[in-house]
Amino acid sequence: MTTRLERVGLLRHGQSTGNLAREAAEAAGHEVIDIAERDADVPLSELGVRQARAAGGWLATDPPELVVASPYLRSLDTARLALAVAKERGVEVPGGLRVDERLRDRELGVLDLLTSHGVAERWPDELRRKQRLGKFYYRPPGGESWADVVLRVRSLLAELSTETPGLRVLFVAHEMTVFALRYVLESVPEQELLATAVRTDVPNGSVTAWERGHDGGFRMTVAQDVGHLVGVPLG
């Protein structure tokens, strides 16, 4: 990918109340996840707030020149809290915080709020269609495929590449964004990307980063790092 970006980082949002609700519903075998808010308004949990503040300590040690966040509340609040902590430590990001809807989480359409069990029970035909098309290109009715998310991310990267040469940017977004970035920045093939996703855990509050090499391509230099979260109390 031809770009003037020097480094791209991704901070996954802190734990949200939606993460907790999904885990509880899946564990109990429920069909529906008990979340009152629309996806864009799901807030951070108490642990998520602590994770975001801990990320601010990391941010202060290696600040980017620009932070771009998903408009979804859990990501936006993670960015705001992290930047506030960095500022408390005397570090400010020159470009500040920018919000961009292209970093929003993948939209699930009719499958929204359903567990894996719920999808199998309520939309068996869609499950079969997903198995036939594959996860990368399958688009649920009213929702998005992985390819749709990749197009959004690719557009944002192309736009940022026209800005300051050597720009170091940090995205604050979602688990899906990590895999979209791997596809675009590293040119990971579809099947390899999906296989990698199965075995890759992207913890809340973790950091992943890519740097441009001498050949102009990007390589991953930090993989889902949670070192800055060590010591963050769970309760």
Image (cartoon, grey):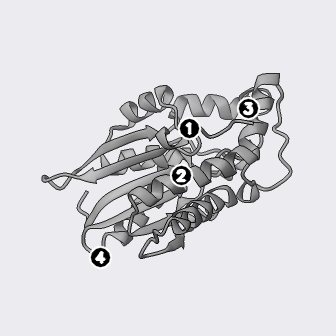
Q: How far apart are labels 2 and 3 at the CA level?
A: 23 Å
**Is 113 rendered above or below residue 125?**
below
Q: Amino acid at mark 1?
A: Pro
Is residue 43 toward the left or the right of residue 106 in the image? Answer: right
| Direction front: furthest residue | 89
Q: Earlier in the sequence, mark 4 or mark 3?
A: 3
Which residue shows up at 75% across the image and 27% down it? 26
Q: Which residue is mark 3?
A: 23
Q: Are marks 4 and 3 in contact (CB under 8 Å)?
A: no
Q: How far apart are labels 1 and 4 at the CA level?
A: 31 Å
Name the spot of residue 120 as percent of width and height, x first: 74, 27
Q: How far apart are labels 4 and 3 at the CA level?
A: 41 Å
Q: Nearer the viewer, mark 1 or mark 3?
A: 1
Q: Quadrant of the C terminus?
A: top right
| Direction left: furthest residue | 214
Q: Are marks 2 and 3 in contact (CB under 8 Å)?
A: no
Q: How far apart are labels 2 and 4 at the CA level?
A: 25 Å
Front residue of 25 and 47: 47
Q: Secondary structure at mark 2?
A: helix
Q: Are there few (<14), some (14-19), or many (20+) residues within 10 Å of tag 4?
A: few
Which residue shows up at 38% across the image and 69% down it? 65
Q: Quadrant of the N terminus?
A: bottom left
Q: Which mark is residue 55?
A: 2
Q: Earlier in the sequence, mark 1 or mark 4?
A: 4
Q: Which residue is mark 1?
A: 203
Q: Are marks 2 and 4 in contact (CB under 8 Å)?
A: no
Whether residue 119 is visible to the viewer of this picture, yes or no, is yes
Whether residue 141 is visible to the viewer of this picture, yes or no, is no
Q: Earlier in the sequence, mark 2 or mark 4?
A: 2
Q: Which residue is mark 4?
A: 164
**Is 217 rendered above or below residue 225?**
below
Q: How far apart are labels 1 and 2 at the CA level?
A: 13 Å
